[in-house]
């Protein structure tokens, strides 16, 4: 029991340090520009050694995008929990509500993050790569909702991919509007554009 408690405390402490380092990185990138900031700059600003910083983040991109690390799992869990009689497209839309919760909790920081990611090619590419990693869990969740055992069908993969594209389009439009447009409405509109007629 004591060993498990120590491990849990270590994990909590590690997560707290990782969050703090991510915030320092985001502030520095926002102020000086992503391309001008080095790993050494990040470590110095955080008051840690380069090797310590690299223990938490392997790249500059990961230092910013770590905030999205759990989004894929959360969306997949939300999708699995949707009512069985709900069609896949509606279930995907509702499940993606978990991915936009942070935008409502802190719209100013979320808008700054969305702009930094969109305006920085390396971050944009890494974000799309991370989202690509969400697709297997979403496709599996869709298959399981039908009572199928994996592997998911091509249709499951296509719906999962299209849903993520709807999310990205909605966030881009929200960012372009300086956060004035309602993100929920934008996501609904994106989904409606691809809904079966």
Image (tube, helix red, strand yellow):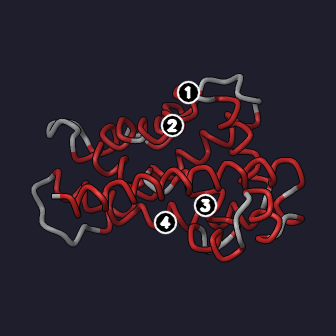
Which residue is denoted by mark 4 in the rendering? 132
Relative to residue 183, is residue 18 depicted above or below? below
Label 1–label 2 contact, CB within 8 A: yes
Q: Earlier in the sequence, mark 1 or mark 3?
A: 1
Q: Which of marks 4 and 2 is nearer the N terminus?
A: 2
Q: Position of residue 64 (x, y in %)?
A: 66, 56
Which residue is denoted by mark 1 in the rendering? 104
Q: Earlier in the sequence, mark 4 or mark 3?
A: 3
Q: Quadrant of residue 181?
A: top right
Which residue is denoted by mark 2 in the rendering? 100
Q: Nearer the viewer, residue 164 or 195?
A: 164
Q: Is residue 153 left or right of residue 92?
A: left
- Few, some or many C-alpha atoms within 10 Å of disc 1 (few <14, some 14-19, many ≥20)? few
Mark 3 element type = helix
Mark 2 element type = helix
**Image quarter (top left, top right, bottom left or bottom right) of the C terminus:** top left
Relative to residue 90, is residue 60 depicted above or below? below
For the point 18% across and 36% down, the residue is: 83
- Few, some or many C-alpha atoms within 10 Å of disc 2 (few <14, some 14-19, many ≥20)? some
Label 1–label 4 contact, CB within 8 A: no
Q: In this view, does 174 lie to the left or right of 102?
A: right
Q: Earlier in the sequence, mark 3 or mark 2?
A: 2
Q: In which quarter of the image is residue 81?
A: top left
Task: Tell me how far mark 1 sits from mark 4, CA to CA.
Answer: 24 Å
Which residue is denoted by mark 3 in the rendering? 127
Task: Tell me how far mark 4 sits from mark 3, CA to CA.
Answer: 9 Å
């Amino acid at each position: 029991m004591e060993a498990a408690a120590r491990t849990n405390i270590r994990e909590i402490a590690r997560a707290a340090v990782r969050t703090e380092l991510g915030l320092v990185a985001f502030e520095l990138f926002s102020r000086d520009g992503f391309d001008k900031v080095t790993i050494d700059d990040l470590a110095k600003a955080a008051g840690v050694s380069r090797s310590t910083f690299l223990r938490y983040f392997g790249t500059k991109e990961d230092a910013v995008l770590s905030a999205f690390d759990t989004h894929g799992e959360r969306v997949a869990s939300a999708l699995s929990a949707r009512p069985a009689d709900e069609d896949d497209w509606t279930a995907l839309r509702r499940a993606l509500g978990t991915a936009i919760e942070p935008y409502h909790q802190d719209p100013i920081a979320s808008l700054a993050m969305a702009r930094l990611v969109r305006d920085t090619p390396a971050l944009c590419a890494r974000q799309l790569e991370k989202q690509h990693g969400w697709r297997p869990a979403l496709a599996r969740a869709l298959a399981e909702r039908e009572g199928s055992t994996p592997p998911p069908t091509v249709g499951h993969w296509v719906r999962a991919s299209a849903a993520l594209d709807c999310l990205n389009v909605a966030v881009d439009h929200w960012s372009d509007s300086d956060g004035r447009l309602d993100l929920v409405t934008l996501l609904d509109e994106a989904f409606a554009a691809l809904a079966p007629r």
